[in-house]
Image (cartoon, rainbow, N blue to C red):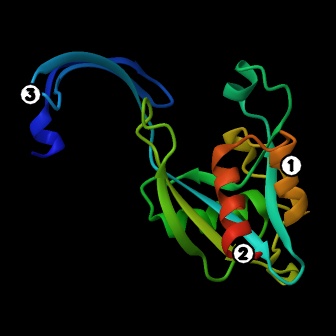
Amino acid sequence: MTVSDRIRIKSERVLSDGYCVLTTTTFEWRRDDGEWQSQSRETYHRDNAAALLPYNLSQRTVVLVRQFRYPANVRGYGDLLIEAAAGLLDNETPEKRIRAEAEEETGYRLGEVRKIFEAFMAPGAVTEKMHFFVAEYDAKMRIGPGGGLADEGEEIEVLELPVDEALAMIDDGRIVDAKTIMLLQYAALNIFR
């Protein structure tokens, strides 16, 4: 039996249609024992996205960004977030979009970008799937200051950090963004061994 055989949608209603769409859905789920259970969930429909960790193996550095994130501020995080460059796909391929995001946010025009995995970031409530990339960089690839797009409300600081310092920032709580932690852990295990 497939998952689609185990679910019956009863109703769906749009609660908000702003930056993203928020719906509430009532459905029946067929449990393992064969019983149908009525459930209700709110779902935040967000476009898929891509994230990238540029790294320099010989210098043992990575490029991250620092910016304001309102939802983190609402939860009491009183600082700017340190993150991997990322953005929504906007109807582009993940590879094409992440190259554009890298240039906009970090100022680097990268060569080969390598996809390493995909993951749902908050599957209990958000539809977004993140495509994760790594790419080598060097100083010659820097074509501009980065900083993001002001007309999109971005004000981004570019950080070039030793990978060991970035990993230590996870331990001491200066890096709390999930996509960034995942990329740095991947780099520690697979790139900077």
* Gap in angstroms between the C-alphas marked 2 and 3: 54 Å
Badge 2 marks a residue whose secondary structure is loop
Kind of residue at disc 2: Arg
| Position of residue 47 in the picture relative to residue 180 (left or right) | left
Q: Which residue is mark 2?
A: 109
Visible residue check, residue 158: no
Q: Are marks 2 and 1 in contact (CB under 8 Å)?
A: no
Q: How many marks?
A: 3
The circle drawn on residue 169 is 1
| Position of residue 135 in the picture relative to residue 166 (left or right) | left
Visible residue check, residue 59: yes
* Gap in angstroms between the C-alphas marked 3 and 1: 48 Å
Against 23, is 85 above or below? below
Instruction: Give the percent coordinates (x, y) of residue 167.
Output: 82, 56
Which tag, 2 or 1, sits closer to the chain's start? 2
Against 111, is 11 above or below? above
Which tag, 3 or 1, sits closer to the chain's start? 3
**Which image quadrant: the N terminus?**
top left
Q: Nearer the viewer, residue 15 or 7?
A: 7
Against 136, is 36 above or below? above
The circle drawn on residue 34 is 3
Residue at horizontal 83 percent and vertical 46 percent from the top:
171
Badge 3 marks a residue whose secondary structure is loop
